[in-house]
Amino acid sequence: MRSAILAGGSASRFDGAPKGLERVGGERIVDRVIQSLESATGELPILIANAPEAEEWCPNLKVVGDAVFDCGSLGGVYTALVAGEGPVFVLAWDMPFVPSEMLTAMIDKLGDHDACVPASSGPNGGLQPLCAIYGQTCVNTIRKQIVDEDLRLTEIFGLVNSARLSSSEIEAFGNPDKIFFNVNAPADLAKAQEFLRGDPD
């Protein structure tokens, strides 16, 4: 299965610095994401990014710019889908703790479904759309959302035949708060270090 890393957002809380290049445990967040995706899918991901310097971030990755602009994460997922054939595993580049074993479980669970998404407790109904698999049947649905100016990424899972990794299935791979933790601001780097020390509180 192919995969894609979404490097979107303005990183305003990092003064414009690319947050995926920040380090957690001495390793860049994006490199941790690459390792998880490559281990689960058997191939290197592509990088969805618009920054002119993006090709310098990960020279071993193919960089693809947004196919549609100003559509947020939904546009990033659409770009990942139309960049190749078949389903694509999409993962945000600011999530340093997503285990490859969970990604493999999601690939196994996809089956004949149009999409597969983790569903843990939390915002967005617990759905984690930036750690999800999207099949080619999602393309037309996303196109319609874009035309309708409905950019809510979680909406797609109610519009297509989606499989969901339940809270109990997720917990088999670790603490969901850690798994889905994303680094959005400098203070989050300190929190990430606490997770590494096994002291999330």
Image (cartoon, rainbow, N blue to C red):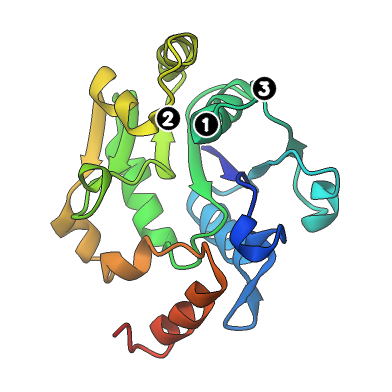
Quadrant including the C terminus: bottom left
| 2 or 1: mark nearer the eye | 1
**Disc 1 versus disc 3: distance between alpha carbons?**
10 Å
First along the sequence among labels 2 and 1: 1
- From the viewer's side, name the closer residue of 29 and 39: 29
Q: Quadrant of residue 177?
A: bottom left
Q: What residue lies at 48% left-to-right and 53% top-to-bottom? A: 40
Residue type, label 1: Val
Position of 65 relative to 182 (above/below): above
Judge left or right: residue 153 versus residue 90.
left
Residue type, label 3: Ala
Residue type, label 2: Tyr
Crowding around mark 2 (Cα neighbors within 10 Å: few <14, some 14 to 19, many 20+) is many
First along the sequence among labels 2 and 3: 3
Judge left or right: residue 86 versus residue 195.
right
Q: What residue lies at 57% left-to-right and 73% top-to-bottom? A: 186
Q: Which residue is mark 1?
A: 77
Crowding around mark 3 (Cα neighbors within 10 Å: few <14, some 14 to 19, many 20+) is some
Observer able to see residue 173: no
Instruction: Tell me the number on the disc at residue 67.
Output: 3
Q: Which residue is mark 2?
A: 134
Q: Position of residue 53 (x, y in %)?
A: 85, 49
Secondary structure at numbered mark 1: helix
Q: Position of residue 7 (x, y in %)?
A: 63, 47
